[in-house]
Image: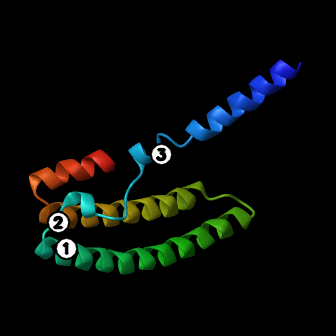
Amino acid sequence: MKILKIFLILSSLFIFLNADDDHYKEHKYKNLEYLKLDTNQIKQMRTILIKYKNKYEEFYEFKEDREDELEDLIKEETFNSERYTKILTIIHTKAIELQTQRMEEIFNILNKKQRKEICKIS
C-alpha cells in the first residue's frame, strides 16, 4: 500500500511538473522582438496597435449592447429566432472585419521573413 501511495505521489508530481511544456510552443507573444522590426516598422506597428486598441474598445461596447438585445429577446414571451440569428451574425461579422483590417495593415508593414515568423507563433 505504501508503494502505491509513493507511486501516486511521484506520478502526480511528474505530471504536474511537465504539464506546462507545450505552453510556450503555442503561446502568442505580446512582445514582438522576435520579428526584429526596424525603427520605421516599430513606429508603424505602434500606430496600428493603438488605432485598433481604440477600435476594439468601441467594438466591445457595441458587442455588449447587442448582447443586451439578445438577453431581451430571450426574456420575451415568444422567441424570435430570425432576430437572434441576425444580431449574432452582426456581432461576428463586425469582429471578423475588424480582425481582417488589423491583419491586413500588419501584413503590409512586414517583410516575407517576418510574416513567416509571425505565422509560427499565431
Q: Residues within 10 Å of mark 1 (few under 14, many from 20)?
A: some
Work out how far the residue at label 1 is from the one at label 2, CA to CA, in angstroms: 6 Å
Residue at numbered disc 3: 23
Q: Badges 3 and 1: C-beta atoms under 8 Å apart?
A: no
* Residue at (13, 63) in percent of width and height: 108
Q: Is residue 76 visible?
A: no
In the rendered view, would you say 116 is above or below 34? above
Q: Badges 1 and 2: C-beta atoms under 8 Å apart?
A: yes
* Residue at (43, 64) in percent of width and height: 90
- Label whose residue precedes the other's in the sequence (1 or 2): 2
Q: Is residue 58 visible?
A: yes
- Badge 1 element: helix
55 sits left or right of 74 in the view = left
The residue lying toward the viewer, choosing from 81 and 101, is 101
Q: Residues within 10 Å of mark 2 (few under 14, many from 20)?
A: some
Work out how far the residue at label 3 is from the one at label 1, CA to CA, in angstroms: 27 Å
Residue 104 % position (x, y): 20, 62
- Quadrant in the picture for residue 45: bottom left
The numbered disc on residue 37 is 2
Instruction: Check disc 3 and give the amino acid type.
Output: His
- Badge 3 element: helix
In the rendered view, would you say 52 is above or below 96? below
The residue lying toward the viewer, choosing from 63 and 44, is 44
The residue lying toward the viewer, choosing from 92 and 114, is 114
Q: Residues within 10 Å of mark 3 (few under 14, many from 20)?
A: few
In the rendered view, would you say 118 is above or below 8? below
- Label whose residue precedes the other's in the sequence (3 or 2): 3
77 sits left or right of 110 in the view = right
Residue at numbered disc 1: 42
* Residue at (56, 37) in percent of width and height: 18
Work out how far the residue at label 3 is from the one at label 2, CA to CA, in angstroms: 25 Å
- Quadrant in the picture for residue 114: bottom left
